[in-house]
Image: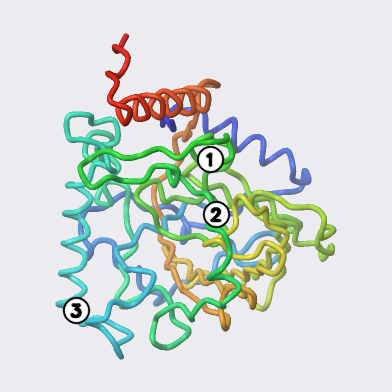
């Protein structure tokens, strides 16, 4: 299974990324881009005023995106039916959504019983109030189509075998337990085995650890996800995409500047780690990063896969500054978890078969 452990070794990770850069790199974080401390109210988290604010820039003249950011948000990806036809919430509705989201952060324990607090968000400071969150008055992250909903899937996508994701091998039984489907190691998926955790693209808020560290110079931008501590190293020098035969866990990203907006186009995904079971051969994700305030980046992404959705769709996720550095997110399957999961399921299958024949199950050791 996946275990999570926070270790103060972030300097090692940042040092690894820095090696990739030329010696002329200067982290030109201006006072306008300094990370702000975690806060506990939506009011305190509101975007800073841009009055009198000057865009911080790197030595090569591009907007400075360097720093620690979070995508933590209470806004759903798709627009709920009760907000049909409405792009934004009222002030009162937005406040109610923030309060409800913060309460959920205190209540949830990530599918673990209350008596097992290893994933208790209040125990390890994983609540949005402690991690920081990005207030958002939109009724959905999806902004195109205008109805805030994903376009319909194509017949090809509907017939496509479902990809194996995190814990997809467990079929809940409705009584707090579940049936394990683990005939081969591949059934268990890449997250449980810690092969690949997260990091995008796209960048979307999850249950916790929604931070991203951005490191840049004239030739590269590095995005390091807090969840999984995984790196995306994106060239900005105009080189073409890798051969279509090369598939990477986070795809093959290529970036360029369009005015003050960083545009990153990513293709060449691996089938085991493709967003929402899209077709890795036809999926293209285009991300846009635009610094709009001292403490905010407007991040948007467009999903274009004609073999999976009937038309492209776009979402906007505000990224807000948070205090760094991040602790390392260490995932370990202990080199035995896959073996134990599969052995346990074989034993369960044998016990069920013996019970079905009227025999008593073997005694537990």
Which label's residue is closer to the chain start, 1 or 3?
3
Mark 1–mark 2 distance (CA, rounded to whole Å): 23 Å
Q: Viewer-nearest of labels 1 and 3?
A: 1
Mark 3–mark 2 distance (CA, rounded to whole Å): 40 Å
Q: Nearer the viewer, residue 293 or 59?
A: 293
Locate residue 151 relative to residue 221 in the image: left or right.
left
Label 2 Cα neighbours within 10 Å, binned few <14 / some 14-19 / many ≥20: some
Q: Residue at x 23, y 50 (%)?
A: 105
Query: Tag 2's secondary structure?
Result: loop
* Residue 130 in the image, given as x and y percentages of width and height: 27, 46
Image quarter (top left, top right, bottom left or bottom right) of the C terminus: top left
Q: Viewer-nearest of labels 3 and 2?
A: 2
Which label's residue is closer to the chain start, 1 or 2?
2
Locate residue 305 relative to residue 3 in the image: left or right.
right
Give me the disc on residue 37. Answer: none
Residue at the spot of label 2: 163
* Residue 347 in the image, given as x and y percentages of width and height: 41, 23
Residue at the spot of label 3: 91
> Mark 1–mark 3 contact, CB under 8 Å?
no
Q: Viewer-nearest of labels 1 and 2?
A: 2
Locate residue 106 relative to residue 187 in the image: left or right.
left
Give me the disc on residue 229. Answer: 1
Image quarter (top left, top right, bottom left or bottom right) of the N terminus: top left
Query: Tag 3's secondary structure?
Result: helix
Tell me how the rendering is colored.
Answer: rainbow
């Amino acid at each position: 299974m996946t275990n999570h452990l926070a270790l103060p070794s972030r300097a090692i990770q940042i040092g690894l990324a820095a090696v990739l850069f030329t010696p002329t790199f200067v982290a030109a974080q201006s006072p306008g881009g300094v990370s702000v401390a975690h806060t506990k109210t939506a009011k305190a988290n509101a975007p800073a005023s841009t009055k009198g604010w000057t865009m911080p820039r790197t030595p090569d003249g591009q907007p400075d995106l360097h720093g620690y950011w979070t995508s933590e948000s209470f806004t759903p990806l798709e627009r709920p039916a009760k907000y049909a036809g409405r792009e934004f919430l009222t002030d009162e509705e937005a406040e109610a959504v923030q309060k409800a989201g913060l309460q959920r952060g205190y209540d949830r324990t990530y599918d673990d019983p209350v008596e097992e607090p290893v994933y208790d968000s209040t125990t390890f400071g994983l609540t949005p109030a402690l991690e920081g969150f990005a207030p958002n008055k939109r009724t959905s992250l999806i902004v195109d189509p205008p109805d805030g909903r994903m376009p319909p899937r194509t017949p090809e996508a509907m017939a496509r075998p479902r990809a194996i994701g995190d814990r997809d091998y467990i079929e809940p039984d409705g009584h707090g337990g579940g049936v394990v489907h683990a005939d081969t190691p591949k059934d268990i998926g890449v997250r449980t085995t810690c092969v690949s955790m997260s990091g995008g693209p796209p960048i979307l808020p999850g249950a916790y650890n929604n931070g991203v560290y951005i490191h840049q110079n004239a030739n590269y931008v590095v995005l390091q996800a807090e969840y999984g501590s995984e790196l995306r190293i994106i060239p900005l020098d105009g080189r073409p995409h890798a051969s279509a035969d090369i598939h990477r866990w986070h795809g093959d990203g290529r970036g360029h500047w369009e005015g003050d907006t960083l545009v990153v186009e990513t293709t060449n995904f691996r089938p085991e780690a493709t967003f929402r079971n899209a077709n890795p051969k036809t999926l293209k994700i285009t991300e846009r990063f635009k610094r709009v305030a001292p403490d905010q980046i407007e991040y948007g992404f467009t999903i274009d896969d004609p073999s999976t959705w009937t038309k492209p769709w776009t979402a906007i996720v505000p990224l807000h500054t948070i205090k760094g550095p991040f602790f390392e997110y260490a995932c370990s399957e202990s080199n035995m978890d896959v073996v134990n999961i599969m052995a346990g399921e074989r034993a369960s299958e044998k016990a069920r078969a013996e019970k079905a024949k009227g025999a008593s199950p073997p005694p537990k050791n």
